[in-house]
Amino acid sequence: MLKAVIRKQNLKRRAELTDEDFLVLNQLLLAQFKTLDFSGINSIHVFLPIVEKREPDTFLLIDWLQENHPKMSIVVSRSNFNDHSMSHHPYQKEDLKANHYHIPEPQTTEVFKGEIDMVLVPLLAFDQRGYRVGYGKGFYDRFLSEIKTKKVGISLFGMLPEEISDVHQDDITLDICITPKQIYHW
């Protein structure tokens, strides 16, 4: 299947979720997330959800991390849409403001200087090889190609029934993908 087709289908699928189904899926994602092994993880990069696109509610994951792993550094990004790069900043909930695309972003100029041990990666879909379909701008593929880290996809839906056919040489595979029903490992 082509990424453009997958993207369109999964955006529609998300939009059709009832509020109740969306809440249930996020609670199930949180339950799966809690089972991960966080030993050796001192910092985690978390994408912040675009509410209008029904992205997984990563604020639930952040709240759980802050309560259960208070010494862990939580890092979030700010996007540069001119060169499709991201800068990375310590998470402070009161410092967030939605950008033009409705993505909550930190306003601080303070940049996170440490190593990032785990990255929660946004996606619309993923296949049996660990390739993902995002929005097509390559922000996360660029970011992930620059660091050595554990790459964890977060998906409201299970694995695609067939492979993504137009994988690009710069596409980065996931190590893990968390869904409401199970966790996939590669």
Image (spheres, grey):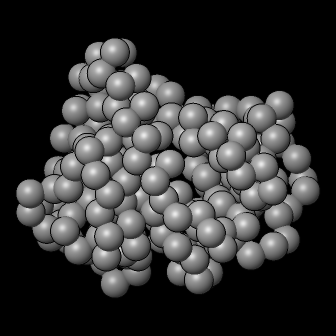
Residue found at x 32% / y 70%? 185
Whether residue 61 sits left or right of residue 36 in the image: it is: right
Q: Which percent across, then down, holds residue 130?
A: 29, 70
Instruction: Count all numbered tags in the image, as a single digit.
Output: 0
Is residue 1 in view? yes
Is residue 122 in view? no
Q: Which percent across, then down, holds residue 76?
A: 69, 52
Vertical arrangement, residue 150 with respect to residue 125, above or below: below
Residue 49, quarter of the rendered image: top right
Which quadrant, please, contains the N terminus?
Answer: bottom left
Whether residue 6 sits left or right of residue 51 in the image: it is: left
Vertical arrangement, residue 96 with respect to residue 173, above or below: above
Q: Nearer the viewer, residue 17 or 29?
A: 29
Residue found at x 77% / y 35%? 93
Residue found at x 88% / y 47%? 108
Whether residue 1 sits left or right of residue 69 in the image: it is: left
